[in-house]
């Protein structure tokens, strides 16, 4: 430490950041709470004011929740929420056949959100300016 204080400070900061990321890694119930809060925020707005991208994203998330299609993957420092084809209790042939399972190369298309350090990145991004209808401003111009 005395020979290389800059390196030691970077290593200590990295370890501290890693510990913080592990401690604040969001869980599935946190995602469900955030979706419910986003839905409530959107319900308070008129259709004329509501951002259509935010509304359709939250509606799709609620549809997945109602159909029990959400799966979570805990990566210790981050949590990935993805959409499955079938409910976990579904016992049809298509749900169990290995040839009909989703491919690993296209798994990224199924990812709905990533939670890091207590925040859900995609939901936060989609809910930005949720109270601004872009179509309304196109009509004015």
Image (spheres, rainbow, N blue to C red):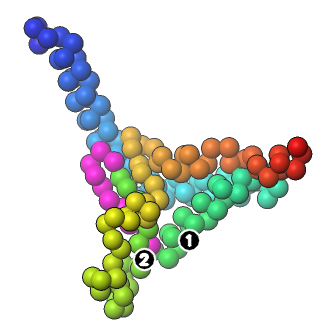
Q: Residue at x 31, y 66 (%)?
A: 104
Instruction: Out of 140 and 83, give the one closest to the viewer.
Output: 140
**Dominant secondary structure of the residues highlighted in magenta in the image:** strand
Q: Earlier in the sequence, mark 1 or mark 2?
A: 1
Q: Residues within 10 Å of mark 2 (few under 14, many from 20)?
A: some
Residue furthest top in the image? 2
Residue 111 versus residue 126 in the image, above or below: below
Q: Is residue 108 visible?
A: yes
Would you say residue 110 sits in the magenta stretch? Answer: no
**Which structural element holds mark 2?**
loop
Relative image position of residue 20 (x, y in whole percent): 31, 35
Q: Residue at x 51, y 70 (%)?
A: 64
Relative image position of residue 102 (x, y in whole percent): 35, 74
Residue furthest bottom in the image? 93
Residue 103 versus residue 8 in the image, above or below: below
Residue furthest right in the image? 140
Relative image position of residue 73 (x, y in whole percent): 32, 59
Residue marked by disc 1: 63
In the image, taking residue 131 as reference, residue 85 lies left or right, namely left
**Which structural element holds mark 1?**
helix
Q: Residue at x 45, y 44 (%)?
A: 119
Q: Where does the C terminus fall, quadrant-wise?
A: top right
Residue marked by disc 2: 85
Residue 39 versus residue 117 in the image, above or below: below
In the picture, the disc for residue 15 is none
Mark 1 to mark 2: distance in Å?
A: 13 Å
Would you say residue 74 sits in the magenta stretch? Answer: yes
Magenta extent:
69-78
Q: Residue at x 79, y 52 (%)?
A: 135
In the image, taking residue 110 as reference, residue 39 lies left or right, namely right
């Amino acid at each position: 430490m005395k020979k290389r204080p800059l390196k030691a400070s970077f290593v200590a900061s990295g370890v501290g950041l890693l510990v913080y990321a592990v401690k604040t890694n969001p869980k599935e119930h946190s995602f469900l709470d955030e979706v419910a809060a986003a839905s409530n925020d959107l319900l308070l707005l008129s259709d004329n004011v509501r951002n259509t991208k935010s509304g359709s994203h939250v509606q799709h998330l609620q549809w997945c929740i109602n159909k029990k299609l959400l799966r979570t993957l805990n990566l210790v420092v981050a949590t990935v929420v993805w959409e499955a084809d079938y409910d976990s209790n579904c016992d049809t042939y298509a749900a169990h056949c290995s040839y009909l399972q989703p491919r690993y190369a296209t798994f990224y298309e199924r990812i709905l959100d990533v939670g890091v350090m207590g925040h859900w990145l995609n939901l936060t991004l989609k809910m930005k300016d949720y109270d601004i209808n872009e179509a309304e401003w196109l009509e004015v111009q």
